[in-house]
Amino acid sequence: MRTRVSVYGLATDTCPQKGPRVLLTQLAEHCYRPGCWTLPGGGMDFGESTEQTLLREVHEESALHATEPELFHVHAFSEQTKRGPFQAVQIVYRIQAQGEPRVLEVGGSTGAVAWVPFSELNELPKVPMLDVILEMLALR
């Protein structure tokens, strides 16, 4: 069985013209679930803490600096893949981030990054974890 531990940042803000919005990344065409939107984040490198992974991944995928990380949710799922059983543990931190995002890591898993208004979320293809997080966010 393969296991992947990954860490993600949940950043929200309010734009005067568009209302509440969330920072999202779109998976590149060569990735699993290409074109789907997710939170900025990714897999842990050997020796990293979850907070180090969070800061590195958010910066690589958005050019923004995450601050004030606070654990929000731990999501896990398993599925059968072509390569056999797969287990994922996805750790989500609530973060602060400001500015206009842009993808720094060229050729990586991120094809695009944007502040997405909540009013547009239903129109986007999303990874399953994002639906779980958005539902939780509505309840908090």
Image: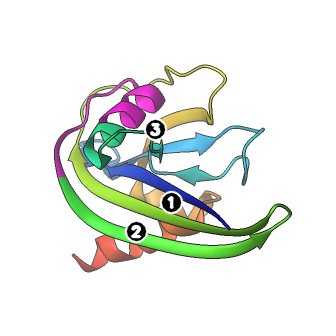
What residue is pinned by disc 1? 121
Quarter of the image for residue 47 reads top left
Q: Earlier in the sequence, mark 1 or mark 2?
A: 1
Closer to viewer: mark 3 or mark 1: 3
User: Which amino acid, mark 3?
Assistant: Asp
Distance between the Cα atoms at labels 2 and 3?
27 Å
Residue 3 occupies which quadrant of the picture? bottom right
Q: Residue at x 70, y 74 (%)?
A: 79
- Residue 108 lies in what quarter of the image? top right
In the rendered image, the quadrant that contains the C terminus is bottom left
Q: Residue at x 50, y 35 (%)?
A: 113
Q: Nearer the viewer, mark 1 or mark 2?
A: 2
Marks 3 and 1, how far apart at CA? 30 Å
Question: Magenta segment: does it hold 125?
Answer: no
Amino acid type at image mark 2 = Leu
Which of the numbered marks, if any, corresponds to residue 45?
Answer: 3
Q: Which residues are magenta?
A: 55-69
